[in-house]
Image (cartoon, rainbow, N blue to C red):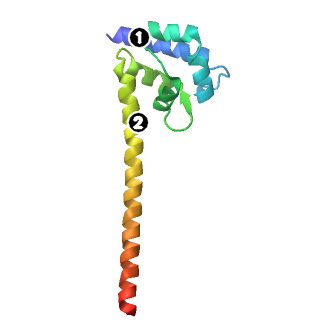
Amino acid sequence: SRRLAMEYQTKLEELFQVVDNDGDGSLTQEEFISALSLPNVQRYLTLLDVRIQDCRPLFDILDDGDGSITIHEFCKGLMQLKGQARSLDIHMLHRENSKVLQKCQDIHLEMNFLCRALATADHQTQNEA
């Protein structure tokens, strides 16, 4: 229900405020891993139906790529992972798939460039002969 979702959001915001030691509104990977390694924080997340076995992939999932997690990224990401144990795996696979796709696209562009360069070189060699 909407009320439960709002309560959950509030609890995640409270948790974020507690673990944001320097109060700058974002968590570095070090802050995040340190905070989520605390038994009290793990118990609290378990109460919220979020089970975390490895903090490093979770940080990568929550982070938008700038190297830190904002309160918005933290709450949105954990709300998406709430409940289903397989959600984390799916998000990890999606992130890794995106990385692989980008590498494939980069390789494709490089191959096109090399093929054009070879074709040009071959054409020049034939003209010189």
- Badge 1, how many Cα within 10 Å: few under 14, some, many 20+? some
Give me the residue at 36% from left, 65% from top: 112
Residue 23 at x, y = what percent?
Answer: 65, 22
Q: Amino acid at mark 2?
A: Arg
Please indicate whether residue 113 sits to the left or right of residue 63 in the image. Answer: left
Of residues 58 and 14, the one nearer the viewer is 58
Q: Look at 42% across and 62% down and name the residue there.
A: 110
Kindly identify which residue carries mark 2. Answer: 95
Question: Is 67 on the left-hand or right-hand side of 112?
Answer: right
Is 41 situated left or right of 1 in this image?
A: right
Which residue type carries mark 1?
Asp
Q: Out of 122 and 65, give the one closest to the viewer.
A: 122
Q: Residues within 10 Å of mark 2 (few under 14, many from 20)?
A: some
| Quadrant of the rendering where the N terminus is positioned | top left
Task: Tell me where residue 121 sits by quadrant.
Answer: bottom left
Question: Which structural element holds mark 2?
Answer: helix
Instruction: Report if residue 108 is visible in the image.
Output: yes
Residue reaching furthest to the right: 22
Residue extending furthest toward the bottom: 129
Tell me: residue 65, above or below residue 126. Answer: above
- Sequence-wise, the earlier of marks 2 and 1 is 1
Count of marks placed on residues: 2
> In the picture shown, does residue 19 fall above or below 114?
above
Outermost left residue: 1
- Image coordinates of residue 119 in percent, x first then y, are 35, 77
Image x and y of residue 17, in percent: 59, 16
Camera sees residue 28: no
- Residue 8, picture quadrant: top left
**Can you give x and y, in whole percent of width and height, for residue 103 in the image?**
42, 50
The residue to which callout 1 is attached is 49
